[in-house]
Amino acid sequence: MDIMDGLSGWLRQVIAVILLASLIDLLLPNRTMQRYVRLVAGLFILLTVAGPIMQWVKGDFGSRLAQGLQSVEKTPEGASRQLAMIEADGAKLRESRLAQAADLTATKLESEIRSEVEQAGGHPVRRVKVNLEKVSDGSLAVAKVSIELEPETVPAGERSDGASSGEVRDVEAVADVEIKVQVGGGKAPEKEPDGAIPAIGGTEGERELDGETRRNVTALVSNRFGLAPGIVEVKLPDEA
Amino acid sequence: MDILQIVGIGFLATVLILVIREQKPMFAYLLAAFVGVGIFLAFVGKIGDVISVLEELADRSGIPSVYLKTMLKIIGIAYIAEFGAQIVRDAGLESIATKIEFAGKMLILVMAVPIISVIVETVLNLLPA
């Protein structure tokens, strides 16, 4: 029974393919393509007639034929080159998008750190710079945050009130003396070191306060933004 | 009824083209091309009925669908190449029309390459080494 079933199926296929070929021959627009179309139709009929033998010799000829026909249809000339070009363009676009995202993130983070330090810490900020770096898994991480503080004009005036007022008085005195200096000129070198000494004393006094400010700002930024304190660098106005 | 309409449009277009051709050959050619495209597009959908019959035939007889697809592609290539070649031929450029037909023939032959390769491989395997 199996042989009879197989035989009848094969016969049916042969008849169907021949009918198909004749219909396609009818559908052709004119005679110029007829020879070529007949060749292909004849090959299909040959394949169908020889189908059982082919299956016996090579089990998978149907799938190989389908694969071959699909590859003929789907691979135009230079497809691999075009694909490589498209992929390279895609990689470029992806990188530029990542760079844009990194810039945007850095800017946003900078503005947030600035507002945080100014509002919560109470220190005016001149500039915040956030450096992002690619880590091993391709994502971005904050590599360094450098915060440059604005010189605090009002508190500095309050802190070094005595020194600065002394300086002002000295300057006034110098201005007075300067008229004499134009005449004599002997006292001018003495006044300059007098003016310089309180300034040195003032910076030494400020340094301790600056260290505290630095620690405060570093702790604030590292706590609020979850950054390691080591990567936060606070520059004070003197260093800047 | 459809065929009467088509023949009527064809006659009308022919008379118009013959009249215009004396004055403006360019417009005559354009009119011919557009009438051709219009008739082609209006009736190319009818071929869908034939194709559905063919698909049913293929399904019921159990022939692989690749055969039918390939044959339909061949028909499509033949029609499009022929159509383009005729429009170009109307403009009097016989050489370009021949090239279009040549391209169509080549594409049909390329379709046959996988079939030929499978047959040749099988025949070679049948023969004792």
Image: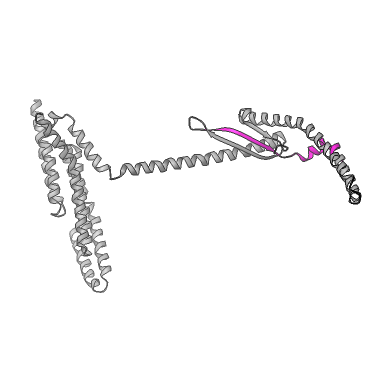
Can residue A3 be seen by looking at this rendering?
A: yes
Q: Look at the image and say whether residue A22 sits in the magenta stretch.
A: no
Image quarter in which the N terminus of chain A is found: top left
Q: Tally the marks.
A: 0
Image quarter in which the C terminus of chain A is found: top right
Q: Is residue A213 left or right of residue A173?
A: left
Residue farthest top in this picture:
A1
Q: Is residue B8 left or right of residue A196?
A: left
Where is residue A164? Give x, y as percent.
84, 39
> Residue A93's image quarter?
top left
Q: Look at the image and say whether residue A147 sits in the magenta stretch.
A: yes
A33 vs A207: above or below: below
For the magenta stretch, what is the residue range? A140-165
> Residue A13's image quarter?
top left
Where is residue A174? Give x, y as percent.
88, 46
B29 vs A5: above or below: below
Residue at the image position 48 percent from the left and 42 percent from the top: A96
Residue farthest bottom in this picture:
B23
Tell me which colouring the rendered structure shows. Answer: one colour
Can residue B55 be seen by looking at this rendering?
A: no
Where is residue A124? Give x, y as percent.
71, 39
Where is residue B67? Give x, y as percent.
18, 40
Residue at the image position 19 percent from the left and 36 percent from the top: A65
> Residue A187's image quarter?
top right
B126 vs A91: above or below: above
Foreground pick, A172 / B11: A172
Residue at the image position 87 percent from the left and 39 percent from the top: A166
Foreground pick, A49 / A144: A144
